[in-house]
Each structure stands twice: as C-alpha cells, then as structure tokens.
Image: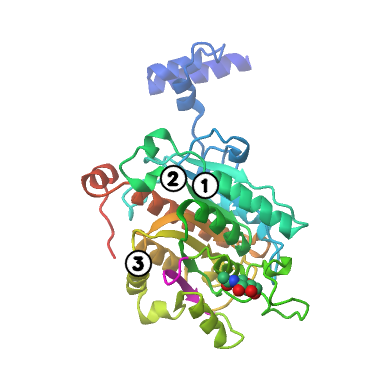
Amino acid sequence: MIRFVTACVIVTLAALVGSHEHEHVADSQEPFVGWTKEDLDAKWGTDWGFSGISTFAHLPHVRCLQHPEEEYDIAVLGAPFDTAVTYRPGARFGPRAIRAASARQTTMRGYNPRAGLNPYREWAKMLDCGDIPITPFDNALAMRQMSEAFANLAHSTATKENRESPVAYRRTPKLLTLGGDHSIALPTLRALNSIYGNVAVVHFDAHLDTWHPAKYPSAWIDPDDAAQQSFFTHGTMFWLAHNESLIMKDKSVHAGLRTRLSGIEDNEDDDAQGWIRFTTDDIDDLGFATMAKRIVEHVGTETPVYLSIDIDVIDPGLAPGTGTPEPGGWTTRELIRVLRGIESLNVVGADIVEVSPSYDGAGEVTALAAAQVGFEVLSSMVKRGMGDGAEKKGKAGGVRDEL
Ligand SMILES: *[C@@H]1O[C@H](CO)[C@@H](O)[C@H](O)[C@H]1NC(C)=O
C-alpha cells in the first residue's frame, strides 16, 4: 500500500512537472539501468547549503597529496597546525570551521557581482585537497611535512589546456591555504620560491610577524642560532622568511597593524627587512581606495604575490575566534573592500590563518568572515586569469564595481 501511494505521488509529481526526465523517476525500479553519468549528475549532483560532506564551497574533495596525477588550477588546502602560537591555541580546528562556514557558497549561486564572474564556474578547476596531516608533537617535523606538502602541490601539473593558455597566470596551479596558525606561511613561501623565486608578501594582520625570534620572554633562546626550533613561531615566520631570503625586498606590505610593540625599533627592524606598513587607522585617514591603490602601486601588478590574511586584522568584536585578538580593528566589510581594491595583483598563493573556532560565537562569525574572504580571494584569482580585454568582458560579462 505504502509503495503504491509513493508510486502515485511520484507519478503525479512527474505529470505535474511534465518533463521526460521526470517520467524516468517514476519507473526507476532499477535505478542505475540506462542512466548516463549526465542524468545522475543532474539528479543527484547538487547540494543545498546545509547538505553534503563539508568541503570548501562544496568543491570536490581529492586527497591531492596521494594523487599527484590529479589536475587542478586552484587547490584549497587545510593546514591544521597550531603548536607555534604565543597565546591562545586552537587554530588547528580552523580549516574545519572555515569549510563549514563556507557551506552557503555553491557553484549554482556563486556569482560575485563585484568581480562579474562566478569563480566556481570559470576557467579554473578547483579542488578541496583536504588537510595536510601535520604532527602536533614536533614542530621540526611539522615544518618538514608542510614544506614538502606545499612544494608537491604547488609543483603539480595544471590542466594541459591551461598550461598552454595565452594567459600566463593560468599556467601554474595556485594554492589557497586555510590555517592553522600563521607560521604555516613559512613553508608556503619556501614552496613558492622554488617556482617563482622571491615573491612579494601582502600581509593583512594586526601584528607585524617580522619579530626577531629572540624577542620573546625567554633568556633560553640563542639569538644567533636561526636553526633553533623555538625560532619558528606564528610571530616570527616572516623574520625567518627574510633570513632565508624568500621575500622580495622593498615590495612587501603590511596592512591593518595596531598591536603594541617592544619599542619603535620593531618598526625599524621591519624597515630593514624591506616592508612598508599601513596601520589600522590608515583606513580612516587614507580611505580604503587610496590604501588599496598605494598597495598595488608599491607591489606592481606583475610581481608574484603571496597574499597572507590573518583573521585578527578584523576587530575581535566581529572576529573573536582567533588566538591573539587586538581590539580596535577593521570591520569585515573594510577588509573585503581593500581586498577587492587589490584584485589586480598577481597573487600566486594565499592563506587565511588564525581562525580558532573555540573562541568564536555560536553564529560562527569569525569562520563566516574567513569563508567570505576566501570567496573574494578566489574571485580575484579567477578574474586575474581571465586575461584582458574582450576575453574578460565577454566571459565575465559583469559590470565592474570600480573603486
Ligand atoms: C640569519 O640569522 C642568523 C642568526 O641570527 C644570522 O647569523 C644570519 O646573518 C641571518 N642571515 C640573513 C641573511 O639575515
């Protein structure tokens, strides 16, 4: 009886919709007989925001490190690591939280009006490559694991079509890493250097992260031994990157700075490492458009850029789920507007770090901000790869929201 009623309902629904495909649903007693892959994709291949296994924006999940044959243009990769933090731990849960918070980003409704494109439907094949299984017990080993993982993925072959693309940007796969604490930027920079040579870093953060590793409250550190494990922290990785000559001098930028310093000499050290700085207050004094313009002018639009976004650049009122919160920061909207303003940069790799969900609110406000930032970064990467002129206009088709 129940079966009969169900069959009637299905037949009635099919009749109401009246399409050939739906008639199939009614008499599919042998569900997989005669169905093509396209049929099955059409029937079962979509997710609601609330359904599906959690990957970033419902992207297909492949464990790329185990599948070097897999082709992609942009890999989203989790680096669940937090044993190099100076204050609250917990960012190892960041990748999971950001993926969960990205659930309402779907291919179907992914059009970004400001960029004039849907990043999930353009030229770029994107995958969620899962997480690097990083040890929480041994930071020297963790560093080796991350360095090897990032290098393997960054060197992976892009699709053949894209390797032959006239648009240079498309020829090498791009990485978007979800942290994890900020120290993960060091192994990523090593990987990018092995492809591009030195890269510029565009760094959004409340903190400098160029601190000398001996500038922490411990007399046990030998300031002259850069190989010490205690040199590797989430506040010193750019100092180490400079020490390893990974960062392009006089092209790198911090923005959103506001933390206390040990003294003005911290800024002088930062100058010596070749950075320029925009403070949190500069967004009021200059306006976001001028700030974005100055960043682009300083870096240049051809320079390969590593875009590193510490979620603590946002005010802890709007992004409390982070390890070293600093009151008085930007709004989520201000960060996103600056990111839109720098979309012409040649971003070859990016990270979103320091999301620590145990300090987040019940509404996942920090993880949501990080997921949205991820969407904007992916939109700009895809837009950059659209090339110039007619191709861009024709394919993207949108009206650009200029500064
Ligand atoms: C790297 O750090 C070590 C230890 O502090 C120092 O001796 C060396 O000169 C540094 N190298 C560069 C290129 O900064």
Picture quadrant where residue 284 is located:
bottom left
What label does residue 296 carry, if any? 3
Mark 1 highlights which residue? 154
Residue 110 in the image: x percent, y percent? 41, 46
Residue 174 in the image: x percent, y percent? 47, 48
Residue at 71% x, 65% y is 89
Residue at mark 3 to residue at mark 2: CA–CA distance: 22 Å
* Crowd rating for badge 1 (residues with CA inside 10 Å; few <14, some 14–19, many 20+): many
Residue 30 in the image: x percent, y percent? 57, 11
Badge 3 element: helix
Task: Say if 397 sits above or below 232 in the image.
Answer: above
Cβ–Cβ under 8 Å for marks 3 and 2: no
Please state which of residues 356 and 290 is positioned toward the viewer in this rendering: 290
Picture quadrant where residue 338 is located:
bottom left
- Residue numbers of the magenta segment: 248-258
What label does residue 200 carry, if any? none
Please state which of residues 193 and 210 is positioned toward the viewer in this rendering: 193
* Crowd rating for badge 2 (residues with CA inside 10 Å; few <14, some 14–19, many 20+): many
Q: Amino acid at mark 3?
A: Val
Residue 146 in the image: x percent, y percent? 64, 52
Cβ–Cβ under 8 Å for marks 1 and 3: no
Left or right of 69 in this view: 251: left
Q: Amino acid at mark 1?
A: Ala
Cβ–Cβ under 8 Å for marks 2 and 1: yes
Q: Is residue 256 magenta?
A: yes
